[in-house]
Image (cartoon, rainbow, N blue to C red):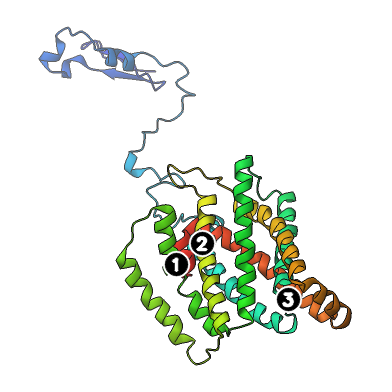
Amino acid sequence: MLAIDTNHSPVVRQHPHHKWLQPVDESEKPRSSLRPQTPSPRASRQSSPVPFADDAPAYTPPRSPASRPPPPYSAAVSPRVYSAHPARTAHAFFQSQPFWLALYFMFNLSLTLYNKMVLVKFPFPWTLTALHALCGTIGGYVLLEQGYYVPARTTSRDNWQLLLFSVLYTVNIAVSNVSLQLVTVPFHQVVRASAPLFTIGLSVALLGTRLNSQKIMTLLPVIAGVGFATYGDYYFTSWGLFLTLLGTLLASLKTVITSILQTPRAGSRGIKLHPLDLLLRMSPLAFIQCVLFGWYTGELERVRRFGALEMTSGKAFALLVNGIIAFGLNVVSFTANKKSGPLTMTVA
């Protein structure tokens, strides 16, 4: 039982958070505190009884912002911890200009050497070009059925432009194959190294670009470097030299026209075709034209006799591999041209 002193008349007050009673002696307070004061709202809230005080959880003060742990993938975490995803990095690399230019260089050099070896035992350039176009047609249809691209809608005027471009496409491949029979591979590569100079001139004439003497001076060491690297095995005939120069001019013209068809310039009307779509449209036309040229020159009759007397399974397989490499080169060539431009393509 609580003993209460009757002399001082203590005031008994119940603490809101406790069950026992706590006596408070009013005489111990300073005189100023005995004045009547209006309690503040905060004090009244604190002095009011709290229901179910026994069951109330313990009060936990909030953490300061500095003491809170950083959320996952926060900017406060070092960027080295959460780097780019490897799959995204690989995808960006496979879509970059250096990757496609390196592929173009590898395919171009491989097909040039392969064509030189094939034409020694299969001396039919129009038929070989028709084989390249046939492989391009089959490969383009397969990729179309697999959903790798969507064909663009073209008008009759666009189709006429594509037909004229297919003639250039066919003649360029055929002239290159014919010239390989008349010159050595090092000489062919040296003459082809001058293609950037033709491309600059054609870009000025067709695209209206400004002639930059600094670019020309930069390209001269590249051409000289190819000459020094292949020096010592030069053989050519006058007709072979003419065809090699003509093939270089046609290759530069084809590169510039391809760039116009895939990426139209401002103020010009272009078709804007996907590289695989352009390949599929060119290949059947090139195949038909090569067959017609072969028939006109009498090459098809020689091919028929060769197939009956000298064709073997090994030679047939070599021709098939040659056609597959040519298809890969066409895909890489059109894609790299769209990503980098005509001048970069001819330098590569």
Q: Amino acid at mark 1?
A: Phe
| Secondary structure found at label 2 | helix
Q: Amino acid at mark 2?
A: Leu
At label 1, counting other C-alpha atoms closer than 10 Å, the crowd grade (few under 14, some 14-19, many 20 or more) is some
Earlier residue among tags 2 and 1: 1
Residue 332 is at least partly visible in this image: yes
Mark 2–mark 1 CB contact (< 8 Å): yes
Answer left or right for 62 relative to 336.
Answer: left
Answer left or right for 223 relative to 111.
Answer: left
Q: CA distance from mark 3 to mark 2?
A: 25 Å
Residue that appears at 48% across and 18% down = 52
Query: x%, y% of residue 234?
Result: 52, 89
| Mark carried by residue 142 | none
Earlier residue among tags 3 and 2: 3
Query: x%, y% of residue 237?
Result: 56, 85
| Mark carried by residue 253 | 2
Q: Which residue is mark 3?
A: 124
Q: Which quadrant holds residue 91?
A: bottom right
| Secondary structure found at label 1 | helix
Answer left or right for 255 relative to 318.
Answer: left
Earlier residue among tags 3 and 1: 3
Q: CA distance from mark 3 to mark 1?
A: 28 Å
Query: x%, y% of residue 203?
Result: 42, 58
Query: x%, y% of residue 114?
Result: 66, 79
Residue 85 is at least partly visible in this image: no
Viewer-side residue, 186 vs 62: 186
Q: Which residue is mark 1?
A: 198
24 above or below 346? above
